[in-house]
Image (spheres, helix red, strand yellow):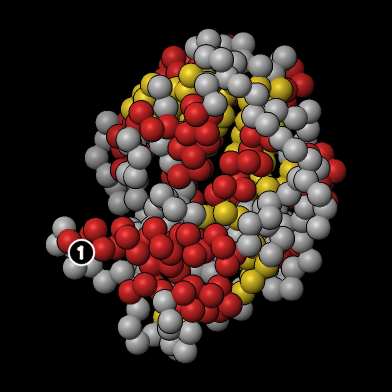
Protein backbone atom coordinates (compact mmCIF):
# COMPACT_ATOMS: atom_id res chain seq x y z
CA UNK A 1 0.00 0.00 0.00
CA UNK A 2 1.25 3.46 -0.94
CA UNK A 3 2.37 5.60 1.98
CA UNK A 4 -0.02 8.50 2.43
CA UNK A 5 1.12 12.09 2.30
CA UNK A 6 0.61 13.78 5.69
CA UNK A 7 -2.20 16.32 5.80
CA UNK A 8 -3.14 18.92 8.38
CA UNK A 9 -6.29 20.93 7.82
CA UNK A 10 -5.27 24.61 7.79
CA UNK A 11 -6.69 26.47 10.79
CA UNK A 12 -9.86 28.38 9.98
CA UNK A 13 -9.18 31.43 12.15
CA UNK A 14 -12.79 32.50 11.71
CA UNK A 15 -12.92 32.25 7.90
CA UNK A 16 -16.50 31.80 6.75
CA UNK A 17 -17.51 28.74 4.73
CA UNK A 18 -20.92 27.65 3.45
CA UNK A 19 -22.05 24.04 3.16
CA UNK A 20 -25.10 23.43 1.03
CA UNK A 21 -26.86 20.30 2.23
CA UNK A 22 -24.85 20.53 5.42
CA UNK A 23 -27.58 18.94 7.52
CA UNK A 24 -27.31 15.75 5.48
CA UNK A 25 -25.17 12.73 6.29
CA UNK A 26 -21.93 13.66 4.52
CA UNK A 27 -22.38 17.42 4.76
CA UNK A 28 -22.81 17.43 8.53
CA UNK A 29 -19.64 15.39 9.05
CA UNK A 30 -17.63 17.78 6.87
CA UNK A 31 -19.18 20.79 8.60
CA UNK A 32 -18.32 19.35 12.01
CA UNK A 33 -14.67 18.87 11.06
CA UNK A 34 -14.38 22.39 9.68
CA UNK A 35 -16.04 23.96 12.73
CA UNK A 36 -13.72 22.04 15.06
CA UNK A 37 -10.79 23.56 13.14
CA UNK A 38 -11.89 27.14 13.61
CA UNK A 39 -13.95 27.86 10.51
CA UNK A 40 -17.18 29.80 10.84
CA UNK A 41 -19.58 27.35 9.25
CA UNK A 42 -22.91 28.32 7.70
CA UNK A 43 -25.12 25.37 6.81
CA UNK A 44 -28.15 25.73 4.57
CA UNK A 45 -30.57 22.85 4.08
CA UNK A 46 -34.28 22.26 3.62
CA UNK A 47 -34.34 19.81 6.51
CA UNK A 48 -32.81 19.60 9.96
CA UNK A 49 -30.26 16.99 10.97
CA UNK A 50 -31.87 14.01 12.70
CA UNK A 51 -28.79 12.98 14.64
CA UNK A 52 -26.86 16.15 15.54
CA UNK A 53 -27.82 19.43 17.16
CA UNK A 54 -26.94 22.44 14.96
CA UNK A 55 -24.28 23.79 17.33
CA UNK A 56 -22.42 20.49 17.03
CA UNK A 57 -21.64 21.02 13.35
CA UNK A 58 -22.24 24.67 12.44
CA UNK A 59 -22.27 28.27 13.66
CA UNK A 60 -25.31 29.30 11.62
CA UNK A 61 -28.10 27.05 10.35
CA UNK A 62 -30.38 28.32 7.59
CA UNK A 63 -33.49 26.18 7.13
CA UNK A 64 -34.46 27.07 3.58
CA UNK A 65 -34.64 25.93 -0.03
CA UNK A 66 -31.53 26.12 -2.23
CA UNK A 67 -33.65 25.81 -5.36
CA UNK A 68 -34.23 29.53 -4.79
CA UNK A 69 -31.24 31.59 -5.94
CA UNK A 70 -31.77 34.27 -3.29
CA UNK A 71 -31.41 31.63 -0.55
CA UNK A 72 -28.07 30.43 -1.93
CA UNK A 73 -26.80 34.00 -2.40
CA UNK A 74 -27.64 34.92 1.19
CA UNK A 75 -25.96 31.77 2.57
CA UNK A 76 -22.75 32.23 0.58
CA UNK A 77 -22.25 35.92 1.34
CA UNK A 78 -18.66 36.68 2.43
CA UNK A 79 -17.64 32.99 2.22
CA UNK A 80 -14.07 31.95 1.47
CA UNK A 81 -15.20 28.45 0.48
CA UNK A 82 -18.45 26.90 -0.68
CA UNK A 83 -19.16 23.18 -0.45
CA UNK A 84 -22.17 21.87 -2.36
CA UNK A 85 -23.41 18.56 -0.98
CA UNK A 86 -27.08 19.47 -1.35
CA UNK A 87 -29.06 16.95 -3.38
CA UNK A 88 -32.45 15.31 -3.38
CA UNK A 89 -31.47 11.66 -3.38
CA UNK A 90 -31.57 8.26 -1.70
CA UNK A 91 -30.93 4.60 -2.42
CA UNK A 92 -31.83 2.82 -5.66
CA UNK A 93 -35.41 2.32 -4.50
CA UNK A 94 -35.85 6.09 -4.40
CA UNK A 95 -33.73 7.15 -7.37
CA UNK A 96 -35.39 4.83 -9.88
CA UNK A 97 -38.89 6.06 -8.95
CA UNK A 98 -38.22 9.81 -8.92
CA UNK A 99 -36.00 10.67 -11.87
CA UNK A 100 -37.92 13.75 -13.01
CA UNK A 101 -38.14 15.27 -9.55
CA UNK A 102 -34.46 14.61 -8.82
CA UNK A 103 -33.45 16.14 -12.16
CA UNK A 104 -35.29 19.38 -11.53
CA UNK A 105 -34.37 19.76 -7.87
CA UNK A 106 -30.70 18.90 -8.15
CA UNK A 107 -30.03 20.90 -11.31
CA UNK A 108 -31.64 23.93 -9.69
CA UNK A 109 -29.55 23.54 -6.54
CA UNK A 110 -26.29 23.05 -8.44
CA UNK A 111 -26.87 26.13 -10.64
CA UNK A 112 -27.74 28.31 -7.68
CA UNK A 113 -24.83 27.26 -5.49
CA UNK A 114 -22.31 27.91 -8.26
CA UNK A 115 -23.75 31.31 -9.09
CA UNK A 116 -23.96 32.25 -5.41
CA UNK A 117 -20.30 31.30 -4.92
CA UNK A 118 -19.33 33.46 -7.90
CA UNK A 119 -21.29 36.45 -6.61
CA UNK A 120 -19.73 36.01 -3.16
CA UNK A 121 -16.26 35.97 -4.78
CA UNK A 122 -15.51 32.71 -2.99
CA UNK A 123 -12.03 31.29 -3.50
CA UNK A 124 -12.90 27.56 -3.57
CA UNK A 125 -15.96 25.58 -4.64
CA UNK A 126 -16.32 21.86 -3.85
CA UNK A 127 -18.93 19.79 -5.67
CA UNK A 128 -20.03 16.38 -4.45
CA UNK A 129 -20.49 14.23 -7.54
CA UNK A 130 -21.16 10.51 -7.70
CA UNK A 131 -19.96 7.25 -9.22
CA UNK A 132 -23.42 7.23 -10.84
CA UNK A 133 -21.96 9.46 -13.58
CA UNK A 134 -20.15 6.53 -15.17
CA UNK A 135 -21.14 4.93 -18.45
CA UNK A 136 -23.46 2.00 -17.81
CA UNK A 137 -21.69 -0.07 -20.46
CA UNK A 138 -18.56 -0.01 -18.28
CA UNK A 139 -20.50 -1.53 -15.37
CA UNK A 140 -22.09 -4.67 -16.81
CA UNK A 141 -19.54 -7.11 -15.37
CA UNK A 142 -19.64 -7.93 -11.61
CA UNK A 143 -15.85 -8.37 -11.80
CA UNK A 144 -15.43 -4.65 -12.47
CA UNK A 145 -11.70 -3.82 -12.59
CA UNK A 146 -12.26 -0.28 -11.33
CA UNK A 147 -13.73 2.76 -13.04
CA UNK A 148 -11.21 5.35 -14.16
CA UNK A 149 -12.31 8.96 -14.42
CA UNK A 150 -12.31 8.96 -18.24
CA UNK A 151 -14.94 6.19 -18.21
CA UNK A 152 -17.61 8.88 -17.72
CA UNK A 153 -17.28 9.76 -21.41
CA UNK A 154 -18.94 9.11 -23.81
CA UNK A 155 -21.83 9.70 -21.43
CA UNK A 156 -24.40 7.00 -20.77
CA UNK A 157 -25.24 6.91 -17.06
CA UNK A 158 -27.82 4.38 -15.95
CA UNK A 159 -30.32 7.01 -14.81
CA UNK A 160 -31.13 10.71 -14.69
CA UNK A 161 -29.49 11.09 -11.28
CA UNK A 162 -26.12 10.19 -12.82
CA UNK A 163 -26.68 12.37 -15.89
CA UNK A 164 -27.63 15.34 -13.73
CA UNK A 165 -24.45 14.86 -11.67
CA UNK A 166 -22.33 14.72 -14.83
CA UNK A 167 -23.93 17.89 -16.18
CA UNK A 168 -23.34 19.65 -12.84
CA UNK A 169 -19.67 18.66 -13.01
CA UNK A 170 -19.34 20.25 -16.44
CA UNK A 171 -21.18 23.36 -15.31
CA UNK A 172 -18.82 23.72 -12.34
CA UNK A 173 -15.76 23.27 -14.57
CA UNK A 174 -17.10 25.96 -16.90
CA UNK A 175 -17.45 28.36 -13.97
CA UNK A 176 -13.88 27.54 -13.04
CA UNK A 177 -12.68 28.41 -16.54
CA UNK A 178 -14.68 31.62 -16.81
CA UNK A 179 -14.27 33.05 -13.30
CA UNK A 180 -11.58 33.12 -10.56
CA UNK A 181 -13.13 30.18 -8.69
CA UNK A 182 -11.15 27.05 -7.82
CA UNK A 183 -13.34 24.04 -8.67
CA UNK A 184 -12.84 20.75 -6.85
CA UNK A 185 -14.97 17.70 -7.73
CA UNK A 186 -15.09 14.28 -6.06
CA UNK A 187 -17.06 11.32 -7.36
CA UNK A 188 -18.29 9.54 -4.24
CA UNK A 189 -18.47 5.75 -4.17
CA UNK A 190 -21.15 4.54 -1.72
CA UNK A 191 -20.39 6.52 1.41
CA UNK A 192 -21.65 4.96 4.64
CA UNK A 193 -21.29 5.21 8.39
CA UNK A 194 -23.03 6.27 11.61
CA UNK A 195 -25.44 9.20 11.88
CA UNK A 196 -26.97 8.79 8.44
CA UNK A 197 -30.41 7.78 7.13
CA UNK A 198 -31.05 4.13 7.95
CA UNK A 199 -34.78 3.61 7.32
CA UNK A 200 -37.74 4.99 5.39
CA UNK A 201 -36.72 4.15 1.81
CA UNK A 202 -34.04 6.79 1.22
CA UNK A 203 -31.29 4.84 2.99
CA UNK A 204 -28.41 3.36 1.01
CA UNK A 205 -27.54 -0.34 0.91
CA UNK A 206 -25.00 -0.38 3.80
CA UNK A 207 -27.47 1.14 6.27
CA UNK A 208 -30.28 -1.11 5.03
CA UNK A 209 -28.08 -4.19 5.37
CA UNK A 210 -27.00 -3.23 8.89
CA UNK A 211 -30.62 -2.68 9.90
CA UNK A 212 -31.67 -6.03 8.44
CA UNK A 213 -28.76 -7.84 10.09
CA UNK A 214 -29.91 -6.57 13.47
CA UNK A 215 -33.62 -7.28 13.02
CA UNK A 216 -33.95 -10.27 10.65
CA UNK A 217 -34.91 -13.48 12.43
CA UNK A 218 -35.48 -16.13 9.74
CA UNK A 219 -34.06 -14.80 6.48
CA UNK A 220 -32.23 -11.79 5.06
CA UNK A 221 -33.86 -10.05 2.09
CA UNK A 222 -31.74 -8.83 -0.84
CA UNK A 223 -33.00 -7.14 -4.01
CA UNK A 224 -31.98 -9.17 -7.07
CA UNK A 225 -29.57 -12.12 -7.14
CA UNK A 226 -27.03 -10.46 -4.83
CA UNK A 227 -24.21 -10.95 -7.33
CA UNK A 228 -24.01 -7.25 -8.17
CA UNK A 229 -20.78 -5.76 -6.80
CA UNK A 230 -19.83 -2.44 -5.20
CA UNK A 231 -17.06 -0.79 -3.23
CA UNK A 232 -18.05 1.06 -0.06
CA UNK A 233 -16.34 4.06 1.52
CA UNK A 234 -16.51 4.86 5.24
CA UNK A 235 -17.52 8.40 6.18
CA UNK A 236 -14.22 9.25 7.91
CA UNK A 237 -12.32 8.51 4.69
CA UNK A 238 -14.84 10.58 2.74
CA UNK A 239 -14.39 13.65 4.97
CA UNK A 240 -10.62 13.32 4.84
CA UNK A 241 -10.68 13.02 1.07
CA UNK A 242 -12.96 16.01 0.55
CA UNK A 243 -10.78 18.27 2.68
CA UNK A 244 -7.52 17.05 1.14
CA UNK A 245 -8.99 17.69 -2.31
CA UNK A 246 -10.43 21.11 -1.51
CA UNK A 247 -7.08 22.35 -0.18
CA UNK A 248 -5.14 20.83 -3.10
CA UNK A 249 -4.41 22.07 -6.61
CA UNK A 250 -6.27 19.19 -8.27
CA UNK A 251 -8.65 20.79 -10.78
CA UNK A 252 -10.15 17.69 -12.41
CA UNK A 253 -12.90 15.34 -11.15
CA UNK A 254 -11.51 12.42 -9.16
CA UNK A 255 -12.84 9.21 -7.67
CA UNK A 256 -13.23 9.22 -3.92
CA UNK A 257 -13.85 5.60 -3.05
CA UNK A 258 -12.44 2.42 -1.63
CA UNK A 259 -11.17 -0.21 -4.04
CA UNK A 260 -12.31 -3.07 -1.77
CA UNK A 261 -15.13 -4.55 -3.86
CA UNK A 262 -17.65 -7.11 -2.61
CA UNK A 263 -20.89 -8.61 -3.90
CA UNK A 264 -24.14 -7.82 -2.14
CA UNK A 265 -24.28 -11.42 -0.96
CA UNK A 266 -20.82 -11.09 0.59
CA UNK A 267 -21.72 -7.74 2.11
CA UNK A 268 -24.82 -9.25 3.71
CA UNK A 269 -22.80 -12.09 5.20
CA UNK A 270 -20.29 -9.66 6.73
CA UNK A 271 -23.13 -7.75 8.39
CA UNK A 272 -24.84 -10.93 9.59
CA UNK A 273 -21.60 -12.27 11.06
CA UNK A 274 -21.45 -9.33 13.48
CA UNK A 275 -24.79 -10.44 14.91
CA UNK A 276 -23.88 -14.15 15.04
CA UNK A 277 -26.26 -14.90 12.16
CA UNK A 278 -23.75 -15.93 9.48
CA UNK A 279 -25.81 -19.07 8.68
CA UNK A 280 -29.05 -17.17 8.08
CA UNK A 281 -30.34 -17.83 4.55
CA UNK A 282 -30.42 -15.00 2.03
CA UNK A 283 -33.77 -14.43 0.32
CA UNK A 284 -33.47 -12.84 -3.11
CA UNK A 285 -36.52 -10.79 -4.07
CA UNK A 286 -37.51 -8.50 -6.92
CA UNK A 287 -36.24 -4.95 -6.57
CA UNK A 288 -33.98 -2.36 -8.22
CA UNK A 289 -30.38 -3.55 -8.36
CA UNK A 290 -28.51 -0.79 -10.18
CA UNK A 291 -25.54 -1.68 -12.36
CA UNK A 292 -23.99 -5.16 -12.19
CA UNK A 293 -20.51 -4.09 -11.12
CA UNK A 294 -19.02 -0.86 -9.79
CA UNK A 295 -15.62 -0.36 -8.21
CA UNK A 296 -13.44 2.67 -7.70
CA UNK A 297 -9.98 3.15 -9.16
CA UNK A 298 -7.47 5.12 -7.07
CA UNK A 299 -4.74 5.78 -9.61
CA UNK A 300 -5.64 9.43 -10.14
CA UNK A 301 -6.34 10.31 -6.50
CA UNK A 302 -2.99 8.77 -5.53
CA UNK A 303 -1.28 10.79 -8.23
CA UNK A 304 -2.98 14.06 -7.28
CA UNK A 305 -3.28 13.78 -3.48
CA UNK A 306 -0.81 11.01 -2.57
CA UNK A 307 -3.67 9.48 -0.58
CA UNK A 308 -6.60 7.10 -0.97
CA UNK A 309 -9.38 5.76 1.29
CA UNK A 310 -8.04 2.97 3.47
CA UNK A 311 -10.69 2.00 6.06
CA UNK A 312 -11.74 -1.60 5.45
CA UNK A 313 -15.36 -2.78 5.27
CA UNK A 314 -14.90 -4.95 8.37
CA UNK A 315 -13.96 -1.89 10.44
CA UNK A 316 -16.43 0.59 9.02
CA UNK A 317 -19.40 -1.78 8.99
CA UNK A 318 -18.87 -2.72 12.64
CA UNK A 319 -19.08 0.93 13.71
CA UNK A 320 -22.15 1.44 11.53
CA UNK A 321 -24.05 -1.62 12.70
CA UNK A 322 -23.39 -0.76 16.37
CA UNK A 323 -24.80 2.73 15.85
CA UNK A 324 -27.87 1.52 13.93
CA UNK A 325 -28.58 -1.09 16.59
CA UNK A 326 -28.65 1.72 19.15
CA UNK A 327 -31.09 3.67 16.96
CA UNK A 328 -33.35 0.62 16.64
CA UNK A 329 -33.37 0.16 20.41
CA UNK A 330 -34.32 3.82 20.82
CA UNK A 331 -37.15 3.46 18.29
CA UNK A 332 -38.48 0.39 20.09
CA UNK A 333 -38.46 2.18 23.45
CA UNK A 334 -40.47 4.97 21.84
CA UNK A 335 -43.09 2.43 20.74
CA UNK A 336 -42.18 1.98 17.05
CA UNK A 337 -43.20 -1.56 16.05
CA UNK A 338 -42.23 -1.23 12.38
CA UNK A 339 -40.70 -4.28 10.69
CA UNK A 340 -37.15 -3.08 10.08
CA UNK A 341 -36.14 -6.30 8.32
CA UNK A 342 -37.82 -5.16 5.08
CA UNK A 343 -36.87 -2.50 2.54
CA UNK A 344 -39.33 -0.47 0.55
CA UNK A 345 -39.21 0.98 -2.94
CA UNK A 346 -40.28 4.61 -2.54
CA UNK A 347 -43.04 5.49 -4.96
CA UNK A 348 -42.97 8.65 -7.02
CA UNK A 349 -43.27 11.74 -4.86
CA UNK A 350 -43.70 15.31 -6.08
CA UNK A 351 -44.21 17.07 -2.76
CA UNK A 352 -40.97 19.04 -3.11
CA UNK A 353 -42.03 20.39 -6.51
CA UNK A 354 -45.47 21.26 -5.24
CA UNK A 355 -43.99 23.12 -2.27
CA UNK A 356 -41.88 25.25 -4.60
CA UNK A 357 -44.86 26.08 -6.83
CA UNK A 358 -47.53 26.26 -4.11
CA UNK A 359 -49.47 23.58 -5.94
CA UNK A 360 -51.34 20.44 -5.00
CA UNK A 361 -49.75 17.06 -5.72
CA UNK A 362 -50.56 15.40 -9.03
CA UNK A 363 -49.32 11.94 -7.99
Residue in front for this viewpoint, 346 or 194: 194
6 is higher (above) or lower (below) than 228 = above
Which residue is rendered at x = 16% and y = 58% of the image?
A: 334
Residue in front for this viewpoint, 221 or 234: 234
Residue in front for this viewpoint, 268 or 63: 268
Q: Which residue is mark 1?
A: 332
37 is higher (above) or lower (below) than 80 = below
318 is higher (above) or lower (below) than 194 = below
Q: Where residue 203 sits in the image (x, y, percent)?
A: 42, 57
Q: Where residue 278 sits in the image (x, y, percent)?
A: 48, 84
Q: Number of marks in the image?
A: 1
Task: Please tell me whether mark 1 sits on a helix, a strand or a loop.
Answer: helix
Which residue is rendered at x = 75% and y = 30% of the image?
A: 248
Q: Is residue 37 visible?
A: yes
In the displayed structure, does residue 5 sit left or right of residue 272? right
- Asked which quadrant contains residue 80, the reply is top right
Which residue is rendered at x = 49% and y = 65% of the image?
A: 318
In the displayed structure, does residue 268 sit left or right of residue 65? right
Residue in front for this viewpoint, 150 or 182: 182
In the displayed structure, does residue 220 sit left or right of residue 265? left
Q: Residues within 10 Å of mark 1 (few under 14, many from 20)?
A: few
In the displayed structure, does residue 225 sit left or right of residue 252? left
Q: Is residue 226 visible?
A: no
Q: Where residue 98 sits in the image (x, y, percent)?
A: 44, 52
Q: Where residue 72 sits in the image (x, y, percent)?
A: 47, 21
Which residue is rendered at x = 33% and y = 83% of the image?
A: 217
120 is higher (above) or lower (below) than 314 = above
The quadrant in which the N terminus is found is bottom right
- Asked which quadrant contains residue 111, the reply is top right
Amino acid sequence: MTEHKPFTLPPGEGAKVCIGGGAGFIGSHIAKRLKENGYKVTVVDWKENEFMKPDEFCDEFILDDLRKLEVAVKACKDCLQVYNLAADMGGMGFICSNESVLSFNNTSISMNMLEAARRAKAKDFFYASSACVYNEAKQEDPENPGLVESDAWPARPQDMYGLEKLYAEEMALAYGRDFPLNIRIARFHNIYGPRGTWKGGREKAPAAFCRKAVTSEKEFEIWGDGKQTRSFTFIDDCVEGVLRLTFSDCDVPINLGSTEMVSMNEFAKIALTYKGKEDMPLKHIDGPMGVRGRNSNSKLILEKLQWEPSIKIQEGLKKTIDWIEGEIERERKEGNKEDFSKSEVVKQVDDSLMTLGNEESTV
